[in-house]
Every structure is written in structure tokens, then in C-alpha cells.
Image (cartoon, rainbow, N blue to C red):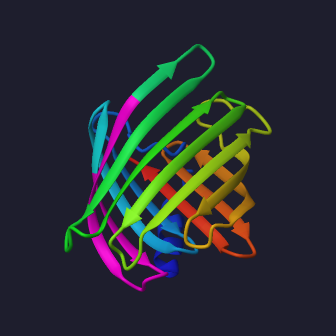
Amino acid sequence: MKALIIIISLLVAPIAMSRPISYVGGHTLMANSGAESDNIYWHYTPSIKYSLGLDYQKDKISGEAFPSARLTYLINRKNTATSQRNLYVKTGFGLDSSDNHFYSLSGDWETRRLFGGFSAKQVSGIGYDLFEQRVKLGVAPYLGAYGDLHTWLMIESKKNDLDNKRITYPVLRFFKGGGLIEFSYHKKTDWDIHLMYRF
């Protein structure tokens, strides 16, 4: 899986902000590798309010692999002259077993300089149940023009009910055009890598 992610990252030369709903008619391809799982996820956005997608995940805790269908719905969006706020509900159901499913609530607020986001996610049916909470804060060290390479310095904190311990770690995000790459590291979870390309 890590080799596939490296190959995708080489193909995804341009680096964009991670949004669970793209522009209408747009497609998004994502690959993630982390301590708990590796996955590849594609979604299509038929409406400004929702996206539909397919996900293939290899769970590192249970050792199981499973495909799922996903839906993301935009509950609320508020745009101002200097900021944007979003609130989403996300869900996914296993294609090979209806016992595999998740649902989550996530939100973000950002300006060109500052970012804040959160998520609360319940996962069931993959050999265990998991509830996870995440918070991410970030700052852009410089303001680039449209089409430039953009950089975010971030910090993320997460906690789940498997070990009931909070871990906090740095995150580095780069994006340009339709692509994004994000790296984070913590001694407990090792490297997390997130790649995204929007087309």
C-alpha cells in the first residue's frame, strides 16, 4: 500500500485544500496511510450539497480489508469576504458486509491565514468499535497568490476510546491547484500521509 501511495504522489504533482465535497461535476481521489489504516477513496460531487464515493480500506488493527460506499452531506456553509465555515455529516457502509459502517460530524473554519477544524467519528463492524475525536489548528506562514504553492503549519490532536489517550503532533500541508499532500508524525503512530487530487 505504501508503494501505491508513493506512486500516486509522484503522479499527483500539483498539490489543494482538502474538501469532502468538490465543485459540482468534480471528482476527487485520495490516498491515506496512517497508524490505524491505509485507504484509497474516490468521490464524485453531483451537487453543491453532497458527494458520493467508493472507499477501499485496509484496517491495521483488525487486519481486515473492506470496500465501502460513502456519502458526505454539507449541512451548513457560511462564506464571508475573508473566511469560510463548513459543517458536514459523513457516512459509509460496507459493500461486502452491512456490519461495517461509520458516521461522523466534521467542520472547519478558515481564512487565508488561519485554519481550525474538528471531527467526531464512530466506526463499527471491523472487528471492533471505535469512537475518535480530532481537532486541527493551522497557520499559513505566507499568503500566496492563486496558483502558487501554499503551505500550512498545523497541529492536530486526537483521542479514541481504544486506548483513551490523547496524542498531539505537528502536521505539514502543501497544496497547489487540484492537489494536496499532508505529512504528520508522532512516535506512537509513526508517519501519517494524506494525498489528494481533484479533477
How far across and down, in percent of the image, does residue 134 sit? 60, 52
Quick check: 7 left or right of 158? left
Q: Quadrant of residue 69?
A: bottom left
User: Residue furthest toward the right?
Assistant: 141
How far across and down, in percent of the image, does residue 191 sit? 66, 72
Point 60% across, 47% down: residue: 175
Q: Is residue 124 magenta?
A: no
- In this rendering, the answer to whether 116 lies above or below 40 is above
Q: Quadrant of residue 17?
A: top right
Q: Which residues are magenta?
A: 53-75
The foreground one among 123 and 55 is 123
Q: Is residue 58 magenta?
A: yes
The foreground one among 122 and 197 is 122
How far across and down, in percent of the image, does residue 125 sit? 32, 72
Point 48% across, 81% down: residue: 60
User: Residue furthest toward the bottom?
Assistant: 63
Quick check: 152 left or right of 87? right
Point 70% across, 56% down: residue: 171
How far across and down, in percent of the image, does residue 100 sit? 29, 69
The foreground one among 36 and 166 is 166
The main secondary structure of the magenta stretch is: strand
Quick check: 199 left or right of 153? left
Point 57% across, 50% down: residue: 15
- In this rendering, the answer to whether 183 lies above or below 80 is below
- In this rendering, the answer to whether 194 lies above or below 28 is below
